[in-house]
Every structure is written in C-alpha cells, then in structure tokens.
Amino acid sequence: MPVTAKVTARSSRTQVMPGPRRVQAWARLRPYVCTGPALVLLVLFLFVPLLLVAVLSLFEWNLISPTPTWAGLDNYRYLLTPESGTLVVQSLQYMGLAVLGSFVLPIALAVLTRWVGPRSATFYQAVLFTPTVIAAAVAGLVWQFLLLPDAGPVDAVLRHLGLGSHDWLNSPQTALVAVSTIATWKFFGFNYVIALAAVSAVPAPQLEAARIDGANTLQLVRYVMLPIMAPTILFLLLTTVLQALPNVFVFIQIITQGGPSGASNNVLYESYRDAFQQLAVGPGAAASVALVVALAAAAIWQFRLLDRRVHYDH
Amino acid sequence: MTTSLRTTTDTRPRHTKRRAGRLTVQLVMTAACILTAAPVVWMIGISFKRPADIFDSPLNPLPTHPTLANYVDAFTTSDVPHQFLNSMIFAGGTTLGQLAVAVPAAYAFSQWTFRGANVLFTIFLASLPIPFIVFLIPNYILVAQAGLLNTYGGLIIPQLASAYGVFLLRQHFRTFPRAILEAARLDGASETTVITRILLPAVRGPVVSLGVFVFVGAWNEYVWPSLVAPRPDMQILTVGLAQFASAEGGNQWGPTMAAATLVSVPTLAAYLLLRRQIVAAVAAGTVHG
C-alpha cells in the first residue's frame, strides 16, 4: 500500500516535469542561456572596445597599414599640449551648459508644472518631448536655417528688438554656445519627462501638511519636493554630465566640424577627427581613454553621493 | 470668531496671489512650448514654400503659395525610397534584435535565482551610463575587421548591446504576481508557454513601449550609420539627408526642409499615435535608479 502511494506520487511528479535529471540540468542552465546573448553583446561591443581602445592608445596606426607600431606613451604626451588644454576647457564648457539647459531648466519647469492642472501638464509634456523624436541630423539642419545671419528667423526677431545680427554658428565667440543651445532644444524634453515623473511622485498630503505648517512655495520646493526627488535629481545630473559631449556630437559633425578655428570642438569630437579624418588612431584612442577615465570618475563620485544621500533598493 | 475672521481676510490675498502665481507658471510654460515647437513648424512650413518666398518674411513660417516642388526635388536628387528601406531595415532590425535579447534576459533576472545573478546584473547596471559613441573608434575597427562595413549586420549588431531594455523590462516583470506564473507551471505549462502565453500578454505595454522607443532612436541615429555604412546604396535616411544638404551647398533650403520633413514623418506619426508608450519608456526605466 505505501509502495503504491510512493509510485503515484512519483508518477505525478514525472507528469509535471519529465526526466527529472535532465530538467534539473536545464533549470540550472536556462538562466545563463537567457542572459547569455545580452551579456555577450555587451562584452563584445562595450567591454572589449574599452580594452581595445586602451591598447590602441599605446600604438601608432593609420587604420590602413596592416600592423600598428608601438608608440608607448607618446600619444598621451600629445594630450598635455596647450591645444588639448583648450579642448578640455571647451568640453567642460559644454558640460556646464548642458547642466544648465538639460538639468537645471527641465527640473525647474517640471517643478513649476506641479502648479498647473493635470490636463495642462499632459499638454506641456507632449509638446516639450517632441524634439526627442526628431533626428539630431534633422534638428541640426533646421537650426542652421533658423540661425542664418540676417535672413534667419532668430536674427529677424533680434533685429526687431534692436539687437543687430549675428553669425551664431560661424563666429568663434558664439559657436560653442549655439551648438549647445541646439542640443538643449533636442534633449531637454527627455530629462523633463523624467523630472516630471519624479515631481508627480511627490505625495500631495505632504505638500498640504507643509503648506498648513506655514511653508511658502519656495520652502515647499526646497524642503519637501526636492529632497523627495533626490534620487532622480542625482540620476539626471549623472546622465547629463555623461551625455553632454555625446549629445553635441552630431551637431558639431553636421554644422561646425569643430570650427570656426576649433571654437566648438571638444575632446570627444577631436578623438573622432583624429581617428577618422587625420587617420591617427593612437592620439584619438588616447583622448578616448582620458575621457572614459574622467567620466568614470565623475560617475563613481556621483554614485557615492547617491548612496550617501538616499536609501534606495534595486 | 477672531480666528475665522483672520482666515477670511488672509485667504483673499492668498488666492489672488496663487492665481497670479499660476498665471506666471502658465506664461513660462507656454513660452517654453512655443520655443520648442517653432523649429518643427518652420521645417514643415518652409518645405512647402516656393524658393522665392523663403526669405520674404522671415517671421512667417506658413507658405503663402504652397508647393510640392521641394519634395519633387528631394525625391529626384536623392534615392529617398531606397534610403527609406534601409532605415526600415536598420530600425526594425535593431528593435526586433533588442527585444529578442532583452525579453529572455529580463525574464531570467526577474524570475529565477541563480548563481552569479548579482554579478551579472551589476555588469548590466555598470554598462548603463556608458554612451556608445565614446567607443566609436574600437567598434568601427571591430566591424571593419569582421568585414561588415556597408552591411546590415555591421549596422545593426553593435546597436544590440544595450542593457536599457533588460533593465526596463525586469522592473515590469518583477511586479507581475509570481503566484499566477507558479500556478501555470504547476498546471504543466512549460517555461516557454509561461513567457509567451501568460507573462508577455500581461506586460505587453512595457514591451511595446520599449520597442517603439528603440525604433525611434535607431531611426534617428546618424553618427554610427554614417561611419559604417556610407556607401550610397547602404545609406539610411538621416545619412542621405546630411549628404543631400551639403551637396546642395547649404543654399537649397526648400528641398533640404522637404527631405528633413520626410525623415521626421514616421517618428512624428509614431509619436502622435503612441505618445503615452514612448513617454512611459523614458519615465519608467529611470525613476528608481
């Protein structure tokens, strides 16, 4: 009698999972089979390139000759020239402008949106996000037209205001700011949507309570909303700094090519130009390595800040 | 009595103050919306203007004598249909590829505990903030060495290295009640059935969100395709557009705007139809860092 019971129990188990041993092996393997392709792709096109660029930075190579020649740290010595100093300063200017336009401004507008009705909020979000779906190549060409000296609409407005005309994209004084403004137009809405999601997640009762306690609007923002939004704010700061140079890349490539006389250039674009236009892969790779190290340091510093400031789980 | 009196006298200026505040907010937001929308309006407007009218009144984007001549010009100068096809293959392939890679990985991370799961997930997380463009040089060399320049494979495969989809879908898969999946497994459903028949239909929203988001991003890509697929018969729309504009010497604004509008029509249409899904893909994947 007990034997039969055991057999039925066993057979019912086999019904669910035929061939227990094979199933167990498969159950142990399948997580790796499922995550494998994603992992292999990441390793192949993000982590191998990281190594490859470090190796290439020690060689002299023109992309064409069959074998690169050893250069040691020569390519890094080139990074210490005054021209590179200018590139670093301009890269930091791009990052600073990105922090203003794609970090401070979207968060400010998202906070403001808390004070309009939900229907208006949806409308503002829909409009402000639109440039995100427009190709950067398209945006670059359209803005080239908008910023035409004399004949363009921007100059027409400025003339009406009595501010004269400017060749924004072709004068060394304004090219960097103009390129950065175009990138702000294109990428602003992305961060606005993220900030708005965080603003909407601030519980209304907490705002009401603070209001009843006599907090004015500025205090409400400073002491209730922003602390609750802290994880998102730090996340946005991180991505804004990391994305600053990638985000202006297309506009530089299509509109200014880094000019006039290098005024709108930066480290990332220069590394691309070294490799693909000057066919000097080594210096380009060295610049990439320097950039990656700098960005990684910034990222680690911000992650630390994030860990200390807010408790979150993933 | 005194308290109620004080509240009534206090509320009035407060209300007007609030209304003034709200009006200011609406003014600021409206200004931001106008500045954001203007370039798109100008692009479409100029594309229908006669060449002679483009600089007539710089502040009026609307065509007084609408014409399709610019579109005819764009189509005859540049192989738009072929570039359109290339864009479809590139964006479609990137989307399908990313989904095919991200869905099983997200499922594994959300449903199973396995050795090394934490390490693997940390690798995925660590790769999130790395912008692909930073590794343009080594990726180009890898693709060139593999003999994949000017091929769809060379265009698409490196674009599939993205942890964002895994990350986004895992968030949604985790919130799906485990008990339902367990019940199905006990009823004898295979793991594939559990994914395709129960989980995927239930989390269709986020999967579609991710798909549309990836498609739009790939459609708009420029730097990578211009580098690895510059040959005329392999160019996608954005690459063709930039070349068209520079070949025209930057003076043919009508045809350039027509071509720019053509590139934007599919993504703008997708945005009009699927705005909520696209926005959700941006807002959801990031809030909980």
Image (tube, rainbow, N blue to C red):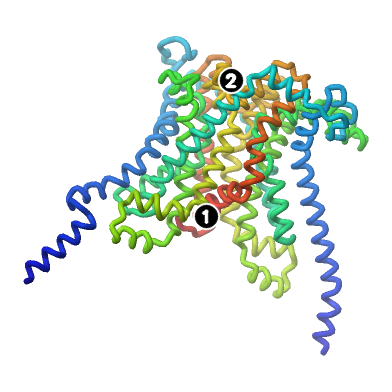
Q: Who's the residue at 64% across and 43% down the image?
A: B271
The residue located at (48%, 25%) in the rendering is B152
Viewer-proximal residue, A145 or A274?
A145
Q: Quadrant of the C terminus of chain A?
A: bottom left
Q: Is residue A124 left or right of residue B17?
A: left
Horizontal side, residue A162 vs residue B3: left or right: right
- Up/down of A178 relative to A261, above or below: below
Pointer 2: residues within 10 angstroms few (<14), some, or many (20+)? some
Label 1 Cα crowd, 10 Å radius (few <14 / some 14-19 / many 20+): some
In this rendering, the count of numbered labels is 2
- Which numbered mark, 2 or 1, is in the foreground of this view? 1
Is residue A305 visible from the viewing direction of this image?
no
Q: Which residue is mark 1?
A: B288
- Residue ID for mark 2: A273
Mark 2 vs mark 1: tell me if same chain.
no
**Which amino acid type corresponds to the residue marked 2 in the rendered image?**
Arg
